[in-house]
Amino acid sequence: MIDEFHKGLEPAAAPQDGSNLRVLIVRTRWNTPIVDGLVDGAKKAMIDQHNVKPENIVVESVPGAYELPFAAKKLLEVSQIRAAEGANDLMGSVNLLDGLNLNSPTISRPASTTGTQPAAASSGPSKQAFDAVICIGVLIKGSTMHFEYICDAVSQGIMRVGLDSGVPVIFGVLTCLTEEQALVRAGMDKAGKGHNHGLDWGSGAVEMALLKNRSL
């Protein structure tokens, strides 16, 4: 018999070193205060627990959860194309993502070098394609069926991006019946008894990225 059960993610048996990884976070702007906390949790876990370099975490935003799968898919494609081309800026000058914000708050973009010699390679952010993606959002049920339709579409869409691309895509979307449930799962409840699931998503992204790259 188990004397006491603690729900949550059991840490991996072996250390998960993400120092060579590049991770994309796609987050929504619905329910921003809660999403902000979840994003901070994911970044904290990757940086503090798994040695991911802060400059190799790229954060992009979309309006709502329904847009998460499209953005994750296209941003992954762009990074893979740029990596194959050997471009210095993996997110620069592409038409695949018209309308999306490609100015990551994590990484400073170099100024345009049109009409000048190519800039020398720097020791800044990694130029590799993304090793993992974390999709983060918060859905809270209202008075209509909209909640159920969006939850199902987003779940299926995020799963499909991962399976189709071969890149781990972490499902970081809270699907809650009340605002209080969402606050508890972001570690932001007044009682202080909640847990920030962003921490688990950050660790999960590193573990799955390393699994993808592992030689068996």
Image: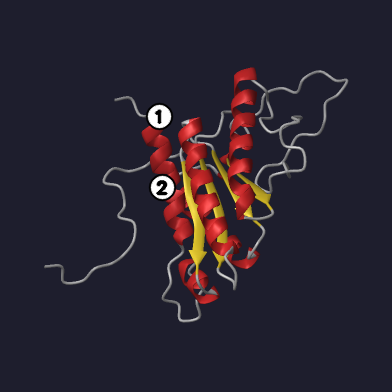
Where does the image place residue 145, in percent across and percent down from the top left? Answer: 57, 65
The quadrant of the picture occupied by the N terminus is: bottom left
The amino acid sitting under disc 2 is Gly
SS for callout 1: helix
Q: Residues within 10 Å of mark 1 (few under 14, many from 20)?
A: few
Residue 46 in the image, given as x and y percentages of width and height:
47, 48
Q: In this view, does 130 lie above or below 103?
A: above
Viewer-nearest residue: 70 or 50: 70
Tell me what residue is drawn at x 61 percent, y 52 percent. Answer: 66
| Residue 175 disc label | none
Residue named by callout 2: 204
Mark nearer the N terminus (2 vs 1): 2
Residue 178 in sight here: yes
Q: Which residue lies furthest to the left in this view?
A: 1
Rendered position, 197 above or below 91: below
In the depicted structure, whether residue 154 falls above or below residue 138: above
Residue 37 left/right relative to 88: left
Determine the secondary structure under disc 2: helix
Residue at 41%, 76% in the rendered image? 193
Whole-angstrom CA distance, mark 2 to mark 1, is: 14 Å
Residue lying at the far right in this picture: please name it: 115
Residue 209, quarter of picture: top left
Q: Residue tagged by mark 1?
A: 213
Q: How many marks?
A: 2
Q: Residue at x 63, y 35 (%)?
A: 74
